[in-house]
Amino acid sequence: MEGTSSKRDRESEGETPKPDTKSKKSGENDEEMDLHHKLDIFSKQMERLLSNQIDMKSNQESLRLSFETQLENLKTELIENMNSKIQILRDEISMDITAERLRIDGLVNTVDDLQAKMSTLECRVATSNHVNPLDNNDVTVVVFGLKFDDGEQIQQKAQQLINSLGHEITNSVTIQAASRLRPRKPNQNGLVKISFDSKEERDVVLRNKRKLGNSTTYKDVYLSRAKPLYERTMEANARTMARLFPD
C-alpha cells in the first residue's frame, strides 16, 4: 500500500514513471505475430498467383495444341475433300472424253458407210451407163400403130417418125436406141420403143405428138410414155373390166 501510494505521490509531483517492461514485450510480440501473419497471407497470395499463372500457361499450351490439332485436322480434311473433288472431276472429264471419242468413232463409221454407199452408187451408175436405154422408162416413148415392114431398119424408121414432128423437134432431140417388140397376136404391128438422151427430150416429143395427126403417113400412129409393168398391168385390167362391165 505504501509503494502504491508513493508511486501516485511521485506522479502527482510530476515525476516520469518508469516504463513497464512486460507490456512493451507483449506489444512487440503482437506486432511480430501480425507481421508473420501478413507475410503468410502474402506468401499464400503469391502462391495462388503463381499457380494461376501456371494454370494459365498450361491452358494456353492446351489451347495452342488444340488449335494446332484443329488446324491440322482442317488441313487434312480440306486436302481429302480437294483430292476427292479432283478425282470426281477427273472421272467426269474421263467419261466426257470417252463419250466424245465414241461419238467421233460413230461419225467416222457413218462417214465410212456413206463413202462405201457412194462408191456402190457410183459403180451402179457406171454400170447403168451400159444398160440398154430402152429399159429406162424416163427417157423412152412407146409407138403404137407403126406399120411393120420386112427387113425394116427400125432405128432409121424411128428417126423418120421424129422428123415428121418438124425440124425444131428433130434438131432438139437425139435417138439413143429403137426396137420393135414382138406382137402379141399374129398379123399385128408390134409396139416400137424409142429412147432419147434425157427425160427432157422425151417430154419434148410427147408434147408435140399431136402433130402426127397432120401427117398422112403417121395419122394412125400414137405416142405414149413408157410405163412400168405394174402400171401397164393395172391399165390392162381396167380395160378388161370396162369390156366385161360396159355402161
Image (tube, rainbow, N blue to C red):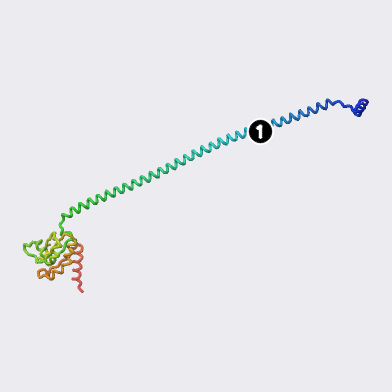
- The amino acid pointed to by label 1 is Leu
The residue positioned 8% from the left and 61% from the top of the image is 153
Please tell me which residue lies in front, 217 or 189: 217
Q: Position of residue 15 (x, y in %)?
A: 89, 27
Quick check: 153 above or below 106?
Answer: below
The residue positioned 93% from the left and 25% from the top of the image is 2
> Badge 1: how crowded within 10 Å, few (<14), some, or many (20+)?
few
Quarter of the image that includes the C terminus: bottom left
Quick check: 47 above or below 200?
Answer: above
> Would residue 84 appear left or right of 157 to someone viewing this image?
right
Residue tagged 1: 49
Please tell me which residue lies in front, 195 or 142: 195
Please tell me which residue lies in front, 200 or 126: 200
> Would residue 2 appear left or right of 40 to someone viewing this image?
right
The residue positioned 28% from the left and 49% from the top of the image is 111
Q: From where the camera sits, is residue 131 visible?
A: yes
Please tell me which residue lies in front, 89 or 191: 89
Q: Quadrant of residue 17?
A: top right
Q: Quadrant of residue 173?
A: bottom left
Secondary-structure class at tag 1: helix
The residue positioned 74% from the left and 29% from the top of the image is 35
Q: Position of residue 19 (x, y in %)?
A: 85, 26
Q: Position of residue 66 (x, y in %)?
A: 55, 36
